[in-house]
Every structure is written in C-alpha cells, then in structure tokens.
Amino acid sequence: MNKKWFAFGCLSVVVIVVIFFVGSFRMMKNFTKTNTKKITEGSWLVLDLKGPVNEHSLYSDSFLGLSSVGLSDIMEKLAQARTDSKIEGIILKPRSAMMGMAEVNQFHNLIKEFKMTGKPVIAYIDNATSVDYFLCSAADEIWLNPSQSAGIMLNGIGATAVFYKDLLTKLGVKVNVIHAGKYKSAGDSYSRNSMSNAMKESYTVVLKERFAKLKKFLELSRGMTPEQVEHLYQKRDNFVVKGEYAYKYGVVDTLGYEGDMFDKFGIDEDKLVKISKYGRPSFPFPGDKIAIVYAEGPITPVTTGRGSTISAKQINKVLDKLQKDTNVKAVVLRVNSPGGSALESDIIANKIKMLQKVKPIVVSMGDVAASGGYYISAPCDYIYSDPFTITGSIGVIMMMPDASGLASEIGIKTESISLSKFHGFGNLWKKPSSTMLKALNDEVQDIYTEFKTVVSEGRDMPMDEVEKYAQGRIWGAELADAHGLIDQVGSMGDAVVKAAELVDLTDYTIDIYPKKKSIFEFILNNKGSFLTLLKSNSAGVRGELMQKAADLEQMLENEKAFMMLPVEIEMD
C-alpha cells in the first residue's frame, strides 16, 4: 500500500512540474508577443525603474524579480526615442531603484543626450530614496507630491563593516586569514571585531572624496548653492525632505499632484509608455562595430543565474566570438565588479590579452572595479574611470576556517593517519599546523606578486611603483588617475569614442554583449543553477543573508585565493 502511494506521489510531482513548465511557457510566449506597446502621436516614455537595476540585463523577460531592463537597454531605447517623432518627452518616476553613483552618473549622461533634442524630461516623486532622487535630478523639472506623507530620503553616504569574530569564537570556530597588503581587509570580517587603522584610513579617504563629488553633483544637476547642499545634509531638522522645505531649498521645482503635472504638460495618461514596453530595433546592423561587453558582479567560477556574476566560462565565450568577428573593430569592456576568485580573474585577463593582439580594448569602470575587477582591467589599452568609481585594492587574501574548538565543545573527536606533509588541508575539525599556514602565506605572496606583475605590464609601471599604490588599498577616481592606475576620468561614452579613435573609425554602430536570453533558455542551459536562481530571489533580509552565505560557500568550495573588496559604500 505504501509503495502504491509513494508511486502515486512521484507521478503527481512529475505531472505538476510538467504542467508548471508548459503553463509557464505558454504564459511567457504570450507575454513576449505583447511585450511592446503600440506608440501613437503624443506618447510619453516613462522610466519607472525599481529594485536592482543592473548595467546589463541578461534576460529578455522579467521573471522572479529579475528585470529585463538594464542601463544598456535604456541606452539603446533612448537613442531610438531621440529620433522617434511620436515620443513627446520622458517622465522619470523611479521607485526604490538600487544603483551605484557611477551608474546614476551614466544615467544622467544618457538623459543629457536625450535632452539635446529639445524634448522635455520631467520627474514626479511620491516617496523617493537618495538613488531615486539623484535619478530624478537629471530632469528639467522635478514635481513632489505635496502630502505630508510624501518626501525624499536624503541621508548621506557611509560604509558599514560587519564583524563575526566574536560570534565565531563563541561557536568555537576560528578563521585563519592570510593576506598580502596591509590594506587588504576582505577577510577582516571573520578574523577581527573592528576595523583596522589601515582599513579605516583608506575607506575614510574614499568616502570623503565621494561625498564631496556627490554634493557637487547636486550643485551641478539642480543648480543648488553649496550653502543649500550643506543645509540639506548637515543642518535640516526633518528626517524626510518634503513640502515647503524641499521647494525652498531647491530640492524640487514644483509641489503638486501627478494629475496637475499631466494637465500642465498636456499629457494623456493613455499615452504613457513604460520603458519596458517600448520596442527597439532587433535587426542586425551591417558594417563596422564597436562592441560593449558588460562584466558585472563578483568574479566566480559558479554561475548563479542572477545575471550579476562574472565567470571565465561566460565572458571568455563572448571574447572568443568578438575575436573572430571581423565587423567588430574594437571592444569596450564595462567593468563593475568588486573582484572574487584569483584564478578566474587571471584566466579572464589572459583571454583579454589574446583578444588584444587582434583588436584594442578600452575599459570603462562602473561603480567599483577593484581587486579582481582591477586585475581584468589592467591589461587593456586604455582605462576610463567614472568620477564615482572605487578602484585599486591590489592585494590577495586566503581564508582557512578552523572548527577544532567547536569540535571540542560538542564532543567531536577526530583521528588522522597522514602519509604526506600537507595531508588534511581543508579539514574543518583539525587545527592547521604552522607549516601549513606558512605554505599558504607563501602562496598568497606568489599570487600577490603575479597581480602586481599584471599591473606593472599593463600600466607600464615599475614594480616598486606598483607596490606604492597596491597593498590592497582602494582609491577614488582622482587619486587613481594621479597614481597612474587609470588613464582618464570619463564616461562610457568617452570610452566608446576612444575605442573608435584607436582604430580610426568615424562611422560605426554599437553591439552589446552578452546577448539577452529568455528565462527558459537559461533554465534549459543551466539546469543545475535554477534552484540557485530561486534561492537568490528570496525576499528581504533573509534572502540577502541566504545569498551572501551561498556566494561565500560557492567561492570557498571552488577557490582558495581571493581578490575581493570587503565593504559596500552605502548611499541612503
């Protein structure tokens, strides 16, 4: 009887799975057919960005919280909207958008190009985060809902490091962190309970530089005086910026409801077109091309499926294709990565050198291009950094957990028979020997020397000069430029122009990589990663913690040495 019910249960699961995939496929097929909206005269394009906005979305569909719209899509769609006579203007209405300031700056550049047509760009705010507001500041005019329940959260900038050493000690776990470079602090979260002086020094310098630029950004985009900006961040009484204060200090231009804004600009609500519904040319362009390749997220051999990681398998496949494509004359590599696996970084850097023999590669750095992100940038022909980029962090760490204390506490006993010097590496229940730790330290130093060599050769800089700016220290754009770690501060548009100059091109089109795929193509090609994709989209803090734990677990399982940035700069 039990066997029958077991068989019936298995059959039921299979039937449910089949129904789910068939039903979802039909739903997605229908969705794809109606994914664009017919554009009529007097239409307004609505940029309603929300949640994480990647620089480049790998997916053609929105699914499980994955957006089909990234900055690369906005770039292409706004280029089309500039010459589309049916598009009257743009409405910016972001809602809890999540982007770095370098990406916000890139967004501003795209809006500036659109405004050169003379078409208006207006923004409407009910409730906005700092990122939402900075996106809206690209508009000709900002409207704010006059309700006391509406407003803008402008809280400033900072960085928070979380330390787990005391917790791990209570559990009987010690993490041995071996690092090269006194500023290399990626493992400090597990081996310390506070910031080191070196870590505090380097992050304070970068934060001060970034905050100064952020305030200047407001002055330039909103025409605010330094005194207004200072009052906004340091002297205001209300936590939420709203109402008359927002109007008085130039944060917004008009207090009014959305309907009032529509009336003023003669906007028909039936003619609002969301950016995700606005089509773009899908036919291939003949002739010479500049390829833009997006390298975004941690560098890891494991593909999570979220479209926000970099692996050698993924990116080298693209670079191989571009090497053979005779229409592609030059490549712009857009790097937005805090680093990750040392080995994967080296494999990617080697592939870049091979492509470089055939055609030039210009780097455009996003919000962060540090550690492994800088490693893959260093060999390229020319490097542009956004004014808000964090880069450098030339250093290496290795982490080796030791749970022998926990084993003692909970009554686990181990006994080993070792026939070789380094037997037992990675055994959590056994305390690593001094011989093992010395050997690992030597290996870290070797990888660090290799990293500096890549920088020395790529930047044409003597090794002793590299060492001055290495040590795992992070740099803002201005100091990175002054120290020769980059060639110039500039936008991705500047990088594209430079790439064209290197091959004497004046007439060309842009081709963007990696190419988009439907979510079903991803499932078919990455069956083992589908559950990872589901887990990575768990909501809230729990989902974020699950993802961080999963990312760390995957890296520790697959790699032993890392080039990683430990702290994210927060803007809220």
Image (tube, rainbow, N blue to C red):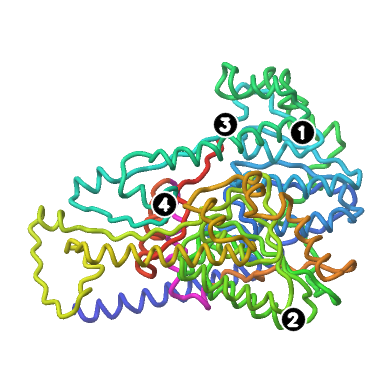
State the image coordinates of residue 99 (x, y, percent, origin top left): 61, 47
Question: Mark 2 or mark 3, which has the lower sequence index?
Answer: 3
Residue in the foreground of this view, choosing between 266 and 419 = 419
Task: Give the extent of the magenta segment.
Answer: 523-540
Question: Mark 2 or mark 1, which has the lower sequence index?
Answer: 1
| Tag shown at residue 337 | none
Which corner quadrant holds the C terminus? Answer: top right
Question: Mark 3 or mark 4, which has the lower sequence index?
Answer: 3
**Residue 243 falls in image quadrant:** top right
State the image coordinates of residue 62 (x, y, percent, origin top left): 60, 60
The answer to whether residue 529 is magenta is yes
State the image coordinates of residue 173 (x, y, percent, origin top left): 21, 53
Local packing at callout 3 (Cα closer than 10 Å; few below 14, some 14-19, many 20+) is some
CA separation in Å, label 3 and label 4:
24 Å
| Tag shown at residue 325 | 2
Which residue is label 1 attached to? 220
Please say if the residues under marks 2 and 3 sit with CB atoms less than 8 Å apart: no
Residue drawn where x is 58% and y is 30% of the image: 153
Residue drawn where x is 39% and y is 77% of the image: 14
CA separation in Å, label 4 and label 1:
35 Å
Q: Tell me the kind of residue under disc 2.
A: Asp
Q: Is residue 538 above or below residue 23?
A: above
Question: Mark 4 or mark 1, which has the lower sequence index?
Answer: 4
Which residue is label 4 attached to? 186
Tell which tag, 4 or 2, sits nearer the viewer: 4
Q: Tell me the kind of residue under disc 3.
A: Gly
Local packing at callout 2 (Cα closer than 10 Å; few below 14, some 14-19, many 20+) is few
Which residue is label 3 attached to? 156
Local packing at callout 4 (Cα closer than 10 Å; few below 14, some 14-19, many 20+) is many
**Residue 164 falls in image quadrant:** top left
